[in-house]
Amino acid sequence: MTVSLKPLADQIVVITGASSGIGLVTAKLAAGRGAKVVLVARNEAALEKAVEDIRAEGGDAIFAIADVGVIEEVQAAAKVAIARYGRIDTWVNNAGTAIYAKLIDTPLDEHRRLFQTNYFGAVHGSLTAIEHLRIKGGAIITIGSIASDLPSPVLSAYSASKHAVKGFVDALRMEITADKLPIAITLIKPAGIDTPIAQHAANHVDGEALIPPPVYDPTLVAEAILDAAQNVRRDITVGGMGRLQVLLGTHFPAILDKLSGILAPAMSDPTAKKTTETSIFEPNQLGHERSGVQPGRRTSLYTAAERHPVAIGAIALFGLGAIVVSLGSKRE
């Protein structure tokens, strides 16, 4: 069955984890471009502020309080969207958390909670969205990570959860295709992004937790999400350097294993004060878009290429043609 996605300005978009970081940036960007947005998260105060900001700019938005680890709360959030707007067109599984620790040092209750949010949050959101999209169609977009393809020291449990997310999304896409449902299934895989995730994380390392470099601006991820809301995309990697890291890990895993001793120290600053206000179990009040610590790159040619494959293909063919003409001229 052909999947047909509406222009963004005609869409109802539900975004989980929308009280900060990528989710908040995406919600504001979508509303600014005419979409009606439903922001979902646990942090009521941050959600209220976000909706106020969107409405002040002329956007249309509401919020629903939900813990994505509890499917009944996710289903209730969907009902809020339906009650207000009558339908859902795009569902974005964005809610996530992190733990900075070696696996042997990670408390099991935190490890389980991380999977409840990162993995089961995506499962609950996707299953809920399918029930609303199976007839008229739409998009389910899930935020994975380059850690979906790549092991990560210190962020070990996070990496494991994102591997699980990728496995779920890829299997779901196969089933949706086999059942001929008009739903686009997309996995977005960002590199390190300048969001408050390190401040929100459970931190068991010395000093302040940092986002693994290189770091990109969350607007790049938001643009990728909104692109996938309007165009069928299998997956999009945000950040060319992140893609290079994945290629290194895929083709030279032994080298990556040896580099872990170099990579691990880059994930914390032992000279800076350690943040203790984790949101892994309860929301904190840090409803910010960015970390304020690690400014991110605002461009990625690789991500632009993934989002515009036809244009890039045309450029490549043009370049190949130019080479052929040049070689022909030289032979003459």
Image (cartoon, rainbow, N blue to C red):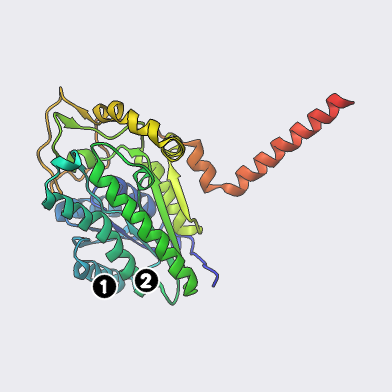
The amino acid type, in three-letter code, at marker 2 is Ile
> What's the CA distance linking mark 2 and mark 1?
13 Å
Residue extending farthest right:
332
Relative to 163, say whether 247 is above or below.
above
Q: Position of residue 72 (x, y in %)?
A: 20, 70
Q: Position of residue 154 (x, y in %)?
A: 23, 37
Q: Is residue 14 left or right of residue 210?
A: right
Of residues 105 and 211, which is closer to you in this image?
105
Q: Is residue 280 left or right of residue 239?
A: left
Q: Position of residue 258 (x, y in %)?
A: 33, 29
The label on residue 79 is 1
Q: Quadrant of residue 132?
A: bottom left
Q: Is residue 314 left or right of residue 220?
A: right
Of residues 259 and 86, which is closer to you in this image?
259
Quadrant occupied by the C terminus: top right
Of residues 222 and 111, which is closer to you in this image?
111
Q: Is residue 196 left or right of residue 188?
A: left
Quadrant occupied by the N terminus: bottom right
- The residue wearing badge 2 is 130
Question: Which sits earlier in the primary sequence, circle 2 or circle 1?
Answer: 1
Residue extending farthest bottom:
135
Q: Position of residue 81 (x, y in %)?
A: 29, 68
The amino acid type, in three-letter code, at marker 1 is Lys
Residue 11 visible to the viewer: no
Q: Residue at x 37, y 54 (%)?
A: 166
User: Under tag 2, what secondary structure?
Assistant: helix
Q: Residue at x 29, y 45 (%)?
A: 159
